[in-house]
Image (cartoon, grey):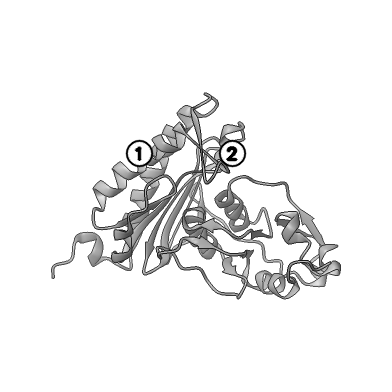
Amino acid sequence: MRLTDHETAAEDWSSDLALIEEAAREAGAVALSHFGQDPEVWWKNGGQSPVSAADYAANACLEAILTRARPDYGWLSEESRDDLRRLETERAFVVDPIDGTRGFLGGQTNWVVSVAVVSRKRPVAGVLVAPALGDVYTAMEGGPALLNGVAIRASESRGGPDDGELALCLPASLADRFQPHFRERMRRAAYIPSLAYRLALVAEGRLDGTLVKPNSHDWDLAAADIILSRAGATLLDDRGKALFYNRPGVRHGTLFAGNRALVGTLLRQFGPPGQS
């Protein structure tokens, strides 16, 4: 079987990274045109999650660009009907057209367009575009994590007693599950509606780490996962395992992000529900 041009360079993801960055920038411009303009809003997931005309417009932009360029790739997006043919593909786009819709609708600027290429269940290229901030995070397998073209690196804090205060972003329900002596060293950062952007701040070193509540989805995580990895950090589940994507189930459990040594410390200090 003859391979296409992008398949012959399977270990060089630069072409795919350039493609998804272009698409994410264009979708970001579409979303930004709705920002602060009171777009129409609907509710999904039993009235728990808002979705706006901006989400749908950015999603249409991404789908048009990406599926035209790579018709053999699967497609998984928060705002598209799940086409399970993606499970038969070696590679797939995993997309959140606006991660942080609540913040977007509330006028906050820290929302992102999140686009990843997943190959064999792991992200190999990822882009987060934050149009209202003018920031673009990119990474691919074998390359550095970049913010606006400049390499970034995660915090090197190991979470030991000599490391001092730890800047962590996590909900109170998870903070309360750490050992009391460890909680005393935690400085909880302000809530960030966009999970992908929060993970990007870990990759950038502005946060030492973060915890993620159960029920995040592939589209919240995949692009940020590869950016974290290339910045010297990691995203693991509560068993200390890496995540896999483009599977039948797209939800994940409690997650930990930070450099590998810190995540190891967080996992050791984390207890079962109800711990005081």
Tell me the quarter of the image containing the C terminus. Answer: bottom right
Image point (71%, 70%), residue name: 266
Q: Label 2, on which residue?
A: 102
Q: Nearer the viewer, residue 75 or 111?
A: 75
Q: Earlier in the sequence, mark 2 or mark 1?
A: 1
As helix, strand or loop, the secondary structure at mark 2 comes to helix
Seen as rendered, the residue at the extreme front is: 46
Do the residues under discs 2 and 1 have CB atoms within 8 angstroms? no
Disc 2 marks a residue whose amino acid type is Arg
- Looking at the picture, how far across and down is residue 65, in whole percent? 30, 43
| Label at residue 273 | none
Tell me the quarter of the image containing the N terminus. Answer: bottom left
Image point (13%, 67%), residue name: 2
Seen as rendered, the residue at the extreme top is: 37
The image shows residue 134, relative to residue 207, as above or below, that is above
Q: Nearer the viewer, residue 43 or 16?
A: 43
As helix, strand or loop, the secondary structure at mark 1 comes to helix
How far separated are the C-alphas under marks 2 and 1?
21 Å
Left or right, residue 9 beside residue 53: left
Q: Label 1, on which residue?
A: 61
Left or right, residue 88 beside residue 56: left
Disc 1 marks a residue whose amino acid type is Cys
Q: Nearer the viewer, residue 77 or 12?
A: 77
